[in-house]
C-alpha cells in the first residue's frame, strides 16, 4: 500500500516533469507550411500563418514538432519565436548552491560585473585548467564513439536583414 | 639701473639646472631610453606571436577563474575537453593548446580568452537541451579565439601602454617591475572587455562561424539557434545579467543567423542532436530525482 503510494507520487512527478519539459510555447513569426516530417521535401499538412501560437513537443535538427490549433506536425525552428515561460531550472538561479565546498552555505555564487572587477589571477586554478587539455587522439576517439561525422562546410556570408 | 625681471631669472635658473642634470647622467643613454619607453604599443598587439597570445590568454583565464573557480567534477570537465577539442579540430587553428573548463557558477555565461581558453558556467551547462546546443556555444567561443576578437578589443585599451613594458612582460616570467606594469594594465583592460563585451559585429561573426564549426564536426548547426531561443524567452534577469549586457539581443542574433543560414544546411544528413554520453552526464531533473530514490522498497520486518 505504502509502496504503491510512493510509486504513484514518483509517476506523477515524472509525468509533470515531462509535461514541463514539453511545455515550451512559441509564436509563428513567418507564414509557411506545417510538414508531416522534419524534412523540407516532406508532405505538407497545410499552411501556418504569422502570429499563430504553437506548443513545442520535440526538437530535431532545425525543426520543431508542434501542436497548432489541434493539428500536429513539424515547422522550421527559425520560423518560430519562443515565448517567455517558466522553465525548469529557471528558479535555480535564485538558489545558487555550491558543490565545491569553497563557498559556504550562505555564499552567493554568481559571476557578475562585481565578481570580475574584484578578481585577481588564480594561478592554482589556471594550473588545474591547463591539466584538463586532452590530446587530439582522445578527442577523435570520443567523436568516433558518438558517431560524429566530419564534413566540409564553408563559412556563411552575412545575410541581408531589412 | 633697470630692475631685474623675475620671470626671466626664473627661466634661466630652470634651464641651467636641467642642463646640469642631463650632463650628470649621460645625455645619450637618457635620450635613447626615453625614446624607447615612449614608444607605444599602438597596433603592436596585432603582431604578437602564438606563445605571447597564449600568455595573455592564460592571465585573463586566471582572472576569470579568480572570479569563479572550476567545477569539481572531473568527468564533466574531461567530457567538455573532448567535445571542445573535437570542435576546435574543425577550426582554422586546430593546433592551439585548447583548454575548456566549467566554472562553478549558476549564472549563464561563456567566455574565451586569447590562445585557446574557453570557459563556460555550470548554469549554462545545466540549461543545455542537448549536446548540439553545447557544441554551438563552444564553437561560438572557438570562433572568437580563431578570429582574435579579444586582441582587437584589448588593443583599444592598451595602445597607449609602453611597447618595451609589453616586451618585458612576454620575456620575463614574474617578479619584474616593468613587466608587472604591463600585466596590471592588461588585467584592467581585460576586465573592461569582459564587463562591456566584444564588438557586436564580432558576436554576429562568431555566431555564423559557430554554426559552421558545429556542422563540420557532425553536430546539428541549429544547436546554437536553440540556445539563442532559450535566451530570447528568458525574462529572468537574475543569473543572465552579465551575459545580456555583453551581447546583442538574442532576437537580433536569431534574425541575423536566420538571414545567413537560410536553407544552407537543409541537405546535410546524419547530423547529431544528442548522444547518450551527454544525456548521462546531464544533471537529472531536480523534480524527478528525489522520488526516484524513494521507489527502493524498504527491507521487510521479520515476522513474529
Image (cartoon, rainbow, N blue to C red):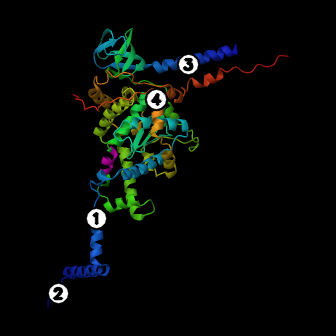
Mark toward the viewer: 3 or 2: 3
Give the percent coordinates (x, y) of residue B20.
Answer: 28, 82
- Circle 2 residue: B3
Q: Which residue is mark 1?
A: B38
> Where does label 3 land, which residue?
A14
The magenta-colored residue range is B149-155
Does the stretch in magenta take in B153?
Answer: yes
Residue placed most toward the observer, B196 or B25: B25
Q: Residues within 10 Å of mark 1 (few under 14, many from 20)?
A: some
Measure the C-alpha gap from mark 1 to mark 3: 68 Å
Q: Residues within 10 Å of mark 4 (few under 14, many from 20)?
A: few
In whole angstroms, how far apart are the C-alphas of marks 4 and 2?
A: 96 Å
Tell me where residue B304 sits by quadrant. Answer: top right
Q: Give the residue number, with chain letter if any, for mark 4.
A: A144
Q: Are marks 1 and 2 in contact (CB under 8 Å)?
A: no
The residue sitting at 36% across, 51% down in the picture is: B189
Cα–Cα gap, marks 4 and 1 = 55 Å
Count of number-bearing discs: 4
Whether labels 1 and 3 belong to a single chain: the reply is: no
Q: Secondary structure at mark 3?
A: helix
Amino acid at each position: 500500500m505504502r509502496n504503491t503510494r510512493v510509486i504513484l507520487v514518483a509517476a506523477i512527478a515524472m509525468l509533470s516533469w515531462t509535461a514541463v519539459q514539453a511545455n515550451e510555447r512559441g509564436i509563428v513569426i513567418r507564414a509557411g507550411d506545417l510538414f508531416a516530417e522534419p524534412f523540407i521535401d516532406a508532405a505538407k499538412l497545410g499552411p501556418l500563418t504569422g502570429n499563430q501560437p504553437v506548443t513545442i513537443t520535440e526538437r530535431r535538427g532545425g525543426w520543431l514538432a508542434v501542436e497548432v490549433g489541434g493539428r500536429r506536425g513539424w515547422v522550421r525552428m527559425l520560423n518560430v519565436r519562443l515565448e517567455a515561460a517558466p522553465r525548469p531550472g529557471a528558479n535555480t538561479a535564485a538558489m545558487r548552491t555550491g558543490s565545491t565546498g569553497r563557498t559556504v552555505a550562505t555564499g552567493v555564487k554568481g559571476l557578475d560585473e562585481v565578481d570580475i572587477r574584484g578578481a585577481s589571477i588564480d594561478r592554482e586554478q589556471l594550473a588545474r585548467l591547463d591539466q584538463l587539455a586532452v590530446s587530439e587522439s582522445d578527442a577523435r576517439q570520443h567523436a568516433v564513439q558518438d558517431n560524429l561525422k566530419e564534413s566540409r562546410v564553408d563559412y556563411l556570408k552575412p545575410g541581408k536583414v531589412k | 639701473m633697470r630692475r631685474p625681471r623675475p620671470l626671466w631669472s626664473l627661466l634661466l635658473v630652470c634651464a641651467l639646472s636641467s642642463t646640469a642634470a642631463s650632463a650628470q647622467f649621460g645625455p645619450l643613454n637618457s635620450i635613447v631610453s626615453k625614446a624607447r619607453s615612449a614608444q607605444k604599443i599602438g597596433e603592436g598587439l596585432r603582431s604578437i606571436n602564438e606563445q605571447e597570445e597564449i600568455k595573455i590568454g592564460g592571465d585573463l583565464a586566471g582572472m576569470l577563474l579568480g572570479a569563479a573557480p572550476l567545477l569539481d567534477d572531473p568527468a564533466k570537465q574531461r567530457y567538455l575537453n573532448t567535445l571542445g577539442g573535437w570542435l576546435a579540430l574543425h577550426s582554422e587553428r586546430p593546433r592551439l593548446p585548447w583548454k575548456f573548463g566549467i566554472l562553478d557558477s549558476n549564472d549563464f555565461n561563456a567566455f574565451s580568452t586569447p590562445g585557446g581558453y574557453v570557459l563556460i558556467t555550470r548554469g549554462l551547462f545545466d540549461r543545455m537541451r542537448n549536446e548540439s546546443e553545447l557544441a554551438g556555444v563552444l564553437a561560438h567561443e572557438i570562433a572568437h579565439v580563431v578570429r582574435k576578437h579579444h586582441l582587437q578589443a584589448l588593443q583599444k585599451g592598451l595602445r597607449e601602454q609602453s611597447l618595451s613594458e609589453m616586451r618585458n612582460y612576454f620575456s620575463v616570467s614574474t617578479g619584474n617591475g616593468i613587466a608587472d606594469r604591463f600585466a596590471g594594465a592588461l588585467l584592467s583592460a581585460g576586465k573592461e572587455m569582459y564587463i562591456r563585451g566584444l564588438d557586436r559585429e564580432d558576436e554576429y561573426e562568431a555566431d555564423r562561424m559557430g554554426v559552421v564549426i558545429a556542422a563540420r564536426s557532425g553536430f546539428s548547426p541549429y544547436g546554437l539557434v536553440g540556445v539563442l531561443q532559450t535566451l530570447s524567452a528568458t525574462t529572468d534577469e537574475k543569473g543572465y545579467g552579465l551575459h545580456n549586457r555583453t551581447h546583442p539581443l538574442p532576437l537580433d542574433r536569431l534574425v541575423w543567423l536566420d538571414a545567413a543560414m537560410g536553407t544552407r544546411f537543409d541537405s546535410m544528413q546524419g547530423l547529431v542532436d544528442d548522444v547518450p554520453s551527454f544525456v548521462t552526464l546531464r544533471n537529472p531533473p531536480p523534480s524527478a530525482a528525489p522520488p526516484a530514490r524513494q521507489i527502493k522498497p524498504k527491507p521487510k520486518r521479520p515476522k513474529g
